[in-house]
Image: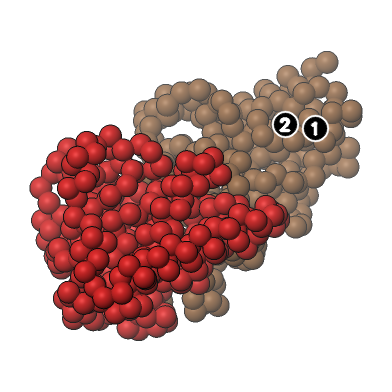
Amino acid sequence: MNCAPADLEAMLMIRHFELALLDLFARGELGGTTHTCLGQEYVPVAMTPLLGPHDHVFSNHRGHGHYLARFGDPHGLLAEIMGREGAICGGVGGSQHIRREGYLSTGVQGESLPLAAGSALHLKRTWPGALACAYIGDGTWGQGAVYETLNIAALWKLPLLVVVEHNGIAQSTPASAHLAGDIAGRAAAFGVRHVSVGSLEVGEIRRALEPLVAGVRLGEPLVAEFVTHRLGPHSKGDDTRDPADVARIPDWHARYETLDGFAAMDSAARELVATVVADVAARPPVRREEA
Amino acid sequence: MRVADNLNAALHGVLGDDPRAYLLGEDILDPYGGAFKITRGLSGRFPGRVLGTPISENAITGLATGLALAGDTAIVEIMFADFVALAFDQIYNCASKSVTMFGSRLPMRLVVRCPSGGGRGYGPTHSQSPMKHFIGMPGLALYEMSPLHDNRAVFAEMLERAQPCLFFEDKVLYTRRMYDVPSPFRWEADGGVARVWLDERPDCVIVAPGGMVPRALEAMRSLLLESEISCALVVPSRLYPFTAEVPAARAVVVAEESTAGGTWGSEVAQVLHRRLWGSLRRPVTQVSSRDSVIPAAAHLERDVIVDADDIRRAVKEALRD
């Protein structure tokens, strides 16, 4: 096991960012809802160097890690979630509706896949070699938009990369109750390439995906299905799973603890996020810009 | 020139002038050229930008939204307006909201074309006028094709607005001639609103979208010749937001093809009541199709869908006191 310090730093920052959000909720300092990616932080960290500056990323309701891995901007994201000055989207979008150059998230399951296909069509003409990457979950495969889009992406040879964070649970419904067959079979039905990613090691994941992602850039869509785990609740404190079962879930964090300097980096990330929280919480509410 | 040819020319114009413009839809490629032949000649002239799609209204509309978000211009043809229901999520939760939900205004050039209306015996799911389901969505504007508005100008306005627009095309207009106004009426189109009138002080003003123009004109002509009632007609190209000027005549009638209940006409009446309450003699009269599914059999369909006679009767009733 080894890991570049920058990767570990990013994963730990996302971990502590999400923990801080749950803490803010518990203390009544955050309203609304938020979906943390605890347990899945390594997925976008592994993906980010595989994506170029002209690639478009589409995120979903559980998107903090996707944003932080791409932009490394905890201040802007927290300000957006807390509705404070410096919010990326003026406090209008909140946790689930974020847009920044080459990045967009939406809060409705499956909605982003057709958008990503549109982006891919745009890029195919304006930036040949660039791709559109959409992060979705296992629950998203209940939506018809997924199949409509895979069909079109395969027919039109769109540079579309679908990253599935298959954490085995859709809100409170286990995959065994919402997913007949499997995702590989569904991709195969459209003649779309599929790869299963079981590793928790970012270097290993990248080595496996690199040649496949290169194919996406040539117009061969790909479904990259990560076998991953949601350690936290769906939203705030709504986990109905047996805590003993949750405790047995493999956590990359525990796996990486053996690395040299881990404890110091973990503390540094916790402190960094604490500073971000203190800074953003002290800011005045963001004012609505008339759009 | 027929309305269909005017619309076809407008699409040629948009795609010819704007190298970023795409047109997507089912069966729109030559030689078929679309279920109503509106896209004839486009796929041959603009290969790669006129794309025939699978039967996937949701994905097509989302894909077009993705193009618009990336700075392209996207036009979607929904084969029958009824099927826009399948794209409702993309329009309601994504395209319209994207203009403002990311904090600052995001310009988007997206037009969803919806051939609407009955009168052709297509039955309950191929004959509707679903405008009312899209009224009041922040970020979305509704337009309707009219024989009194040049479609090239209407498309220019929709794209200039830089927000998603639905463009409803009453199918019965396709074979009608443009600018066909019977004498002795005069007409003009100015700033997106067309007006037809006979004298400056009409007894009644009829407000109607483009698809109703032939029926409204027929009603106006018979009211004039048989009852000496003078009507003026106001036809806004943009249905929503509704901003057209409407003079306060003795009677104001809003006529539309939508089936009754929660309609565009209700929205117009509400706007006019707020604007003109002090000078109106009576509330705005609404004329719409019956509260019914639209039957396939011609005689049953005629009973449901609003016609010139319904407008004529409503005008006389409104002027009775």
Q: Residue at x 52, y 29 (%)?
A: B259
Q: Is residue A142 left or right of residue B141?
A: left
**Badge 2 local density, few (<14 within 10 Å), some, or many (20+)?**
some
Return the residue at label 2.
Answer: B270
Residue B272 appears at what percent x and percent y? 77, 34
Return the residue at label 1.
Answer: B274
Q: Is residue A259 left or right of residue B57?
A: left
Residue A223 appears in the picture as rendered: no
In the image, what residue type sits under mark 2? Gln
Tell me the colour chain B is drawn in.
brown
**Chain containing mark 1:** B
Do residues under tags 1 and 2 come within 8 Å of each other at their CB atoms? yes
Answer above or below: position of A146 versus A101.
above
Residue B154 appears at what percent x and percent y? 62, 60
**Badge 1 local density, few (<14 within 10 Å), some, or many (20+)?**
few
Quarter of the view holding residue B296: top left
Chain (red): A
